[in-house]
Amino acid sequence: VFTRNNFPGHPVTIGRKHIQSGRLQAIIVNSGNSNVATGQEGLALAYKYVNRAADHLQIAPELILPSSTGVIGRPLPENTMLQACDLIKQKIQEADFPGFARAIMTTDAWPKMKTIALKSGIRITGVAKGAGMIEPNMATMLAYIVTDAAIEPELCQKLLSFAVNRSFNRISVDSDTSTSDTVVLMASGKSNVPVQASAEDLTREAEKAPWEEAFLPDENARDFLRGLLEICQQLACEIAKDGEGATKLVELRITQSASQKQALKIARSIINSPLIKTAIHGADPNWGRIVMAVGKVFDEPLKLENIRVYFGSLELQGAGLQDIANYLKQSEICLTVSLGCGQVAERMWGCDLTAKYVAINSEYTT
Amino acid sequence: VFTRNNFPGHPVTIGRKHIQSGRLQAIIVNSGNSNVATGQEGLALAYKYVNRAADHLQIAPELILPSSTGVIGRPLPENTMLQACDLIKQKIQEADFPGFARAIMTTDAWPKMKTIALKSGIRITGVAKGAGMIEPNMATMLAYIVTDAAIEPELCQKLLSFAVNRSFNRISVDSDTSTSDTVVLMASGKSNVPVQASAEDLTREAEKAPWEEAFLPDENARDFLRGLLEICQQLACEIAKDGEGATKLVELRITQSASQKQALKIARSIINSPLIKTAIHGADPNWGRIVMAVGKVFDEPLKLENIRVYFGSLELQGAGLQDIANYLKQSEICLTVSLGCGQVAERMWGCDLTAKYVAINSEYTT
């Protein structure tokens, strides 16, 4: 699953081609330079270092996914990349996920990794990075998930898209869409435990509520999808929590919505509102801003009197403003907005907006 | 012209009814409390003070427009409002526009007013307020424009909508749409100079480029519309420049676009991008963020190689990054993005994002 930005990085362009076969064996990640808007030279260099690594690993170049994050529009240093590829066999002797999680960090405050073992014996490990501060760059995210489950490539893609849509596609740090976003799921089959689901099962699944859950009929597949969702959601939350300058993770639940489209539009309006993000930062129970953010979704008119707002378990009507202010002082906030016009629920994660975000992103790139 | 927010303030609801006749004689403005989401009591109180003022002024209540800005969801103090209305005749002896401009300021850094005299003898005076800092509130804007031109109510509405769409609807401080926004044009006819235009003239006008100009066939009408545009654009720029915490006014020009819709979508993506706003604040020539913001308008795919970016008169390709950084240190920045796919141009105004914006909006409401 790649960024939807219309100007994707060269690594994303190559990655889209390389995953066509449904098979990958290696991922090459660099940070500090996204290799975006670097012209034909940038594309040629990406192919060059992928080929170099393929030679050393003795695999086809098409089995390698390149990934880059960092400043846009600056040439990627050729020697650095090629020299790193020359050391690839010497440096990588065995799987070292914690080491990988640390290596792809740029300005993340902590490495982001999660492993779970399912009843069936399948293991799933996910590693991600979120944006940081040393060099101003995109709120770029990368996530790599591996499993020893036995899954056909086509199903792998479907399960990943399903999980990404319920996790990484539901976070926003600053509403800016990176040109480098990449999420990968690789399944080795080493556990010999098969994960199977039909296209119909997945279509039905997509319509089921609550969408944070999985209900596939096959037990192995259901457990696998639940595990995948858990990993994706946890890594996504870590990225939101580690958002540039952020001090608080915000979970936003939209309930009683008429449609998923409506719920998401309103969720995005709230989670991205600078006025709500700053109020949460200051533990300011300025709920009028939530009214404003719901109301500014012009094409989804609602009745104000049907809307209910909850800060954690405190309902706005009834709770004292001081109680809400105290609740907002916590580092993890749950905000629920019930629209009172249907049965659909949605969830998004975001963070507060702080002076540190401004400081990080005002710094000079060069 | 009122806010498009689906939860408008009670004054806006009343205002929409009162302007039906096309006639107004008085405007009552308060600040610090927007009278939004205050229930039936808030609506009843607004009618009550409008009626009280009408009694004192001996005019029909329908000739009065109420306007409020400030915190949402808090009861408007009844006594304060009624007592002010009781003093209305005593306090207002003659037209005092500078006094009015100061009186409607809440946390604006300076009063916003502009008067122009046209060749025909017509005068136009506009007064506006932009959002401020004492009490965290919406990026709420109000603007009142009066003229002694003789214009029929229907044409008045059309000319105002035309001008607002090319000025106040082209500014963004933080992408949040207030529940109170109001712009009013009142024409007394005292100059005895008629302003006339047919519906066809105005339709043709709307299609003409550049849209900052006016080309109506009748000279008086053309001059009037040019004057109105000038006042609206200047007041709109002042609001953007006085945006909460802002240190810089940003004029964004989109050129060579395939359509107005495309130009505006991309303009909004750029002018509201927190990463671009912070880079401008820090005079950081991080042009990659502009690429990102153009690319994240998913439904308007463009060719990256056709896009040209200018900082003032400096073209990105060719100019040194240090020259661009120096240019960005100015307090008024002009950024031009040429999309290379058509003939349409658009313009928007915004401001930088600063730590002060966060400080202002994190403060406690109560």
Image: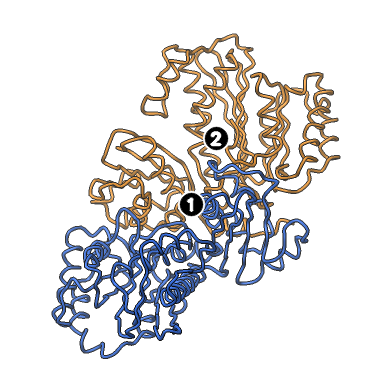
Chain colours: A orange, B blue
Disc 2 + disc 1, Cβ < 8 Å? no
Percent position of residue A111, x then y: 63, 38
Res A94 → quadrant? top right
Subunit that carries the residue with mark 1: A
Percent position of residue A216, x then y: 43, 16
Percent position of residue B356, x then y: 52, 66
How dense is the environment of label 1, judged by Cα within 10 Å: few (below 14), some, or many (20 and up)?
A: many
Residue B250 appears left or right of A94: left
How dense is the environment of label 2, judged by Cα within 10 Å: few (below 14), some, or many (20 and up)?
A: many
The answer to which of B7 and A191 lies nearer the viewer is B7
The CA span between labels 2 and 1 is: 18 Å
Res B30 → quadrant? bottom left
Subunit that carries the residue with mark 2: A
Which residue corresponds to the image point at 32% horizontal and 79% vertical from the top-left? B150
Q: Which mark is residue A235?
A: 2
According to the picture, the residue beneath numbered tag 1 turns out to be A352
Numbered disc 2: secondary structure: helix
* Above or below, comparing residue B29 to residue A107 in the picture: below
The answer to which of A357 and B328 lies nearer the viewer is B328
